[in-house]
Amino acid sequence: MISAVVLAAVAALPLSPALAEEWKRPDSPFTMGEAHPEVPATCETARHWIDHAPATDDRVSFAIEGALVAVHWDGVLAYLIMCDEPGVQVMCVTYSKEGREVGNRVMFAGGYIRAGERRIMLDPCLASSN
């Protein structure tokens, strides 16, 4: 019982300052607010960045570039997915697939939401062709 309480207390502690500030590095694909991050992540670096996102309830923007691995249209929204499993996948929720197909190289930028252990959702999101 005591060990469970201790583990819960340790889990509730804030990240160390080094980890908490990692997202502020010059090569970070994060920025606060709605600004477009200057340096996008890649599928190869997304694993690092998903674990170093800003710990805040404020709006955080994230950018990534790479090839589309899935494109879905439900008649209202487009769901563009980048990066292969088992790595981190990034989904861009936008209003049009604009003729994009699997394999097209694109850049996503939008509101960061961690949607699982290996999932990032950007909503709202802008997708631009490279």
Image (tube, rainbow, N blue to C red):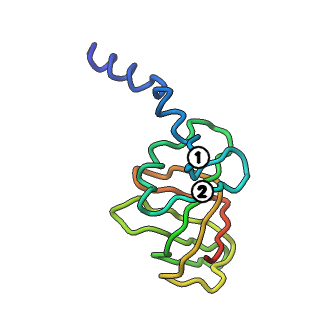
Where is residue 43? Give x, y as percent: 44, 63
Q: Position of residue 39 (x, y in %)?
A: 60, 56
Q: CA distance from mark 1 to mark 2?
A: 8 Å
Name the kind of residue labelled 1 in the image.
Pro
For the point 53% across and 81% down, the residue is 104
- From the image, which quarter does the N terminus lie in? top left
Residue at x-position 55% and y-position 50%: 27
Q: Name the image quarter holding residue 119.
A: bottom left
Q: Quadrant of the C terminus?
A: bottom right
What amino acid is found at the position of numbered circle 2 in the picture?
Answer: Val
Residue depicted at x 48% and y 30%: 18
Packing grade of label 2 (10 A; few <14, some 14-19, many >=20) is some
Q: Does the residue at mark 1 contact the one at mark 2 (Cβ under 8 Å)?
A: yes
Asked which secondary structure carries label 1, the reply is loop
Q: Nearer the viewer, residue 118 or 130?
A: 130
96 to the left or right of 101: right
Q: Is residue 17 above or below residue 82?
A: above
Q: Is residue 1 above or below residue 66?
A: above
Q: What SS does tag 2 mark? A: loop
Classify 83 as above or below 96.
above
Judging by the rendered image, the residue that carries numbered circle 1 is 26
Q: Give the numbered dot on residue 39.
A: 2
Q: Residue 87: x and y, percent?
A: 37, 61
Residue 3 lies, in percent from the top left, at: 26, 17
Q: Give the crowd class for mark 1: few <14, some 14-19, many >=20 residues within 10 Å.
A: few
Instruction: Decide which of tag 1 and tag 2 comes sooner along the chain.
Output: 1
